Image (spheres, rainbow, N blue to C red):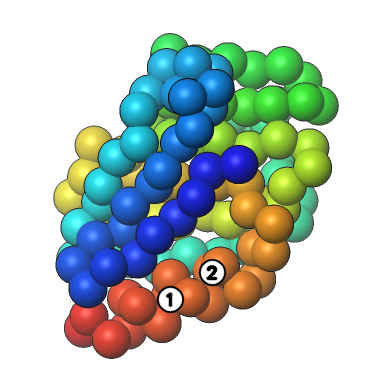
Amino acid sequence: MPRLELTDRELVVHLTPWESIWSLRRGFRVPLAQVRGATEDNGFDGRALGLRLPGTYLPGLIAAGTFIKSGDKQFVYTSRKLQTIVIELARNDWARLVIGVPDARAEAARINAAVARRQ
């Protein structure tokens, strides 16, 4: 499962080597100034992600990589065992990050608190 780290200035997404293989992406950093907020998404359905380019999608098992829908690019890494959060971004290559975590409500609250402190 991806690990999210918050610093004073950045949201850092750490991916394991296997997660990097599935998503065809290494870990990355997003400036907190570009994070608009995070919400839990209990109704996440991988079928609505759009065009996968590049990445992996095995229905009901894993969605990993870059997906494009309606002109919006999003990075996704989640699986059936995880709860999903959606992190909305501004002025970034991606419109949003869709990440699987053990506790979506707590993770979204932690990100939103960091964004509020930054403003």
Q: Is residue 59 above or below residue 15?
A: above
Q: Is residue 21 above or below residue 82?
A: above
Could you tell me how many numbered marks the image carries? 2
**In the rendering, at what x and y percent does residue 49 appear?**
58, 30
Q: In this view, does 78 lie above or below 29?
A: above
Q: How crowded is mark 1: few (under 14 residues within 10 Å), some or many (20 or more)?
A: some
**In the rendering, at what x and y percent does residue 91 appear?**
18, 50
Name the residue that disc number 1 marks: 112
**In the rendering, at what x and y percent does residue 73 appear?**
37, 32
Residue located farthest toward the front when viewing the structure as drawn: 17
Whether residue 112 is visible here, answered yes or no, is yes
State the residue at coordinates (65%, 63%).
104
State the residue at coordinates (24%, 61%).
10
Name the residue that disc number 2 marks: 108
Q: How crowded is mark 2: few (under 14 residues within 10 Å), some or many (20 or more)?
A: many
Amino acid on which the number 1 mark rests in the picture: Asn
Element type at mark 1: helix
Amino acid on which the number 2 mark rests in the picture: Ala
State the quadrant of the N terminus.
Answer: top right
Q: Using the image as rendered, state which of residue 15 and residue 80 is in the foreground.
A: 15
State the residue at coordinates (35%, 36%).
27
